[in-house]
Amino acid sequence: MASLNHCSFIGNLGRDPETRFFSNGDKITNASIACTESWKDKTSGEKKERTEWVNLVFTGGLADVTGCPSVWGG
């Protein structure tokens, strides 16, 4: 049975996406986003923060679209 995995990430772009081209004409675009979570510690009352980096890899037609600076707000 086929299934679909779906993820949504909200974060900040770490650096400009990098697009590489292969000799056969294929493209791949790599990007990374920082997803930051903040909370107040229940015992100390101190504000805590944790950032996790999510690496993204796009191939095919998505590599064309995501390699364009206007997609990322550039």
Image (tube, rainbow, N blue to C red):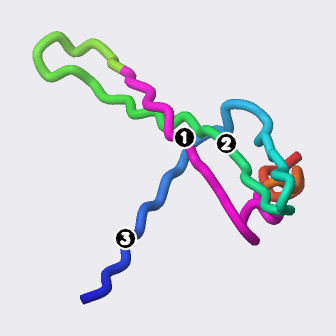
Q: Residue at left 47%, top 60%?
A: 8
Q: Is residue 2 above or below residue 29?
A: below
In the picture, measured across the screen, residue 63 lies left or right of residue 11, that is right
**Which amino acid type is marked by label 1?**
Asn
* CA–CA distance in space, label 3 to label 1: 16 Å
Q: Is residue 65 above or below residue 33?
A: below
Query: Residue placed farthest to the left in the image?
Result: 43
Residues at circles 3 and 2 in contact by the CB criterion of under 8 Å: no
Secondary structure found at label 3: loop
Residue 29 falls inside the magenta stretch: no
Neighbours of disc 3 within 10 Å: few (<14), some (14-19), many (20+): few
Magenta stretch in the rendered image: 49-66
Secondary structure found at label 1: strand
Instruction: Name the residue that disc number 2 marks.
Output: 31
Q: Position of residue 50 (x, y in %)?
A: 38, 24
In the rendered structure, find residue 55 and report the number of the disc placed on it: 1
In the image, 46 versus 18, the foreground residue is 18
Residue 58 falls inside the magenta stretch: yes
**Which amino acid type is marked by label 2?**
Ala
Q: Residue at left 59%, top 39%?
A: 33
Instruction: Name the residue that disc number 3 marks.
Output: 5
- What main secondary structure does the magenta stretch of the protein show? strand
Residues at circles 2 and 1 in contact by the CB criterion of under 8 Å: yes
* CA–CA distance in space, label 3 to label 2: 20 Å
Residues at circles 3 and 1 in contact by the CB criterion of under 8 Å: no
In the picture, measured across the screen, residue 35 lies left or right of residue 67, that is left
Q: Position of residue 56 (x, y in %)?
A: 58, 48
**Which amino acid type is marked by label 3?**
Asn
